[in-house]
Image (cartoon, rainbow, N blue to C red):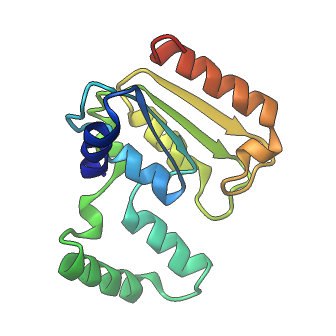
Amino acid sequence: MKNWIHYHNEKFGTCQMILSGLSMGASTVLFLADQDLPDNVKCIIADCGFTSPKAILDKVFRTVVHLPSGLSLWAADLFASMFAGFRLSQKDTRESLKHAKLPVMMVHGLADDFVPYTMTVQGYDSCISDKALLLVEGAGHGTSFLVDKERYTKSVISFLEKHLENF
């Protein structure tokens, strides 16, 4: 992800940049919260992010795939170690957020049955930087905007007005 930021800056210049993601993308941008990024990266917006690969895989194995999580997690951890170069337990957004250098807005639907909204609340509670939290009643996974467009839009605009120059 950091390579993409540098590529963007070289190709298009250093305009203000917001890191934003949904679900796995949300967790990806949250992992960057504690990194030294170019000055034009101004804030992060994360919608329905999970705390760690281990936690979400455990939940998915148990509730979606209906496999015992112990053996499945062991295999996933081995695969990640061999092919991605990290252990599942080594990555946790809460650790990144404990050292966050950027403002972070987190969004989650309270009716999300895929990624528990409590993972976003845990991340929010861990975050030391300026932060905002939007929890949307009745919204499932990735549907907060669709369920409450007005509140979602107002919350994002308010957050961006606070953290972007000349917004």
The answer to which of 10 and 53 lies nearer the viewer is: 10
Q: Does 148 appear above or below 143?
A: above
**Position of residue 34 measured from the top left corner of the image (x, y, whole percent):** 26, 37
The answer to which of 17 and 90 lies nearer the viewer is: 17
**Residue located 35% across and 37% down the image:** 12
Q: Does 7 appear above or below 115?
A: above
**Position of residue 124 measured from the top left corner of the image (x, y, whole percent):** 47, 35
Q: Where is residue 78, by image quadrant?
A: bottom left
Q: Is residue 62 left or right of residue 15?
A: right
**Residue located 52% across and 89% down the image:** 67
**Position of residue 152 measured from the top left corner of the image (x, y, whole percent):** 71, 33
Q: Quadrant of the C terminus?
A: top right
Q: Where is residue 63, by image quadrant?
A: bottom right
How many numbered circles does the render carry? 0
**Residue located 35% across and 26% down the image:** 128
**Residue located 37% across and 89% down the image:** 71
**Position of residue 38 measured from the top left corner of the image (x, y, whole percent):** 24, 31
Q: Does 56 appear above or below 148?
A: below
Q: Does 6 appear above or below 129?
A: below
| Residue extending furthest toward the front | 11
| Residue extending furthest toward the top | 166
The answer to which of 134 and 146 lies nearer the viewer is: 146
Q: Where is residue 88, by image quadrant?
A: bottom left
